[in-house]
Amino acid sequence: MNFKQYDDGKEGRFFVILDNGMEAGWIQYKWLDNGNLLANGTRVYEEFKDQKLGIPLFNRLVEFAEESKTKIYPLCPFVVKTFARHPELKHLLADDYLQDQVRVTESTVLLD
């Protein structure tokens, strides 16, 4: 498996390409004004769902953020859940995302 990247300077996608040359899914992002990445979607095509390709796509996005010396603001539910399962990657979460999570938690506590 390998990855193909599309990036026009405003948004981009990593496509996962299987050894047989077939595209099997993608993870997409937008560049934010502050230079961070907004991870806003992941899709693995139906016929490839049993191959668990979401994690390699997530890992490629993480590698890209590290290479680009930027952080990720996860909006895609899959990316949010995967970051939650990997606290060792917290350093790659955008500061404004972390602040937003604190505000949500504080609001939830106030509503209880």
Image (cartoon, rainbow, N blue to C red):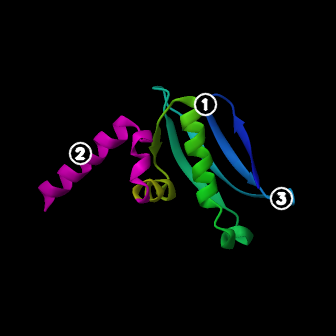
Residue appearing at x 18%, y 50% in the figure:
106
- Distance in Å between CA atoms under marks 3 and 1: 29 Å
Q: Along the horizontal axis of the image, is 62 left or right of 75?
A: right
Mark 1 neighbour density, 10 Å: few (under 14) some (14–19) many (20 or more):
few
x, y (%) of residue 87? 39, 52
**Mark found first going from the N terminus, 1 or 2:** 1
x, y (%) of residue 43? 63, 58
Identify the image quadrant of residue 65.
top right
Q: Along the horizontal axis of the image, is 49 left or right of 19?
A: left
Query: The residue under label 1 is which amino acid type?
Result: Lys
SS for tag 1? loop
x, y (%) of residue 40? 53, 47
Q: Which residue is mark 3?
A: 19
Q: Which residue is mark 1?
A: 10
Residue appearing at x 32%, y 42% in the figure:
98
Mark 3 neighbour density, 10 Å: few (under 14) some (14–19) many (20 or more):
few
Which is more foreground, mark 3 or mark 2? 3
Front residue of this view, candidates 98 and 59: 59
Which residue is most to the right?
20
In the rendered image, the quadrant that contains the N terminus is bottom right
- Distance in Å between CA atoms under marks 1 and 2: 28 Å
Residue 25's mark? none
Query: The residue under label 3 is which amino acid type?
Result: Asp
Residue range in magenta is 85-112
In the rendered image, the quadrant that contains the C terminus is bottom left
Give yes or no for contact between labels 3 and 2 (Cβ–Cβ under 8 Å): no
Query: The residue under label 2 is which amino acid type?
Result: Arg
Residue 103's mark? 2
**Mark found first going from the N terminus, 3 or 1:** 1
Does residue 48 lie above or below 102 as drawn? below
User: Does 87 lie within the magenta span?
Assistant: yes
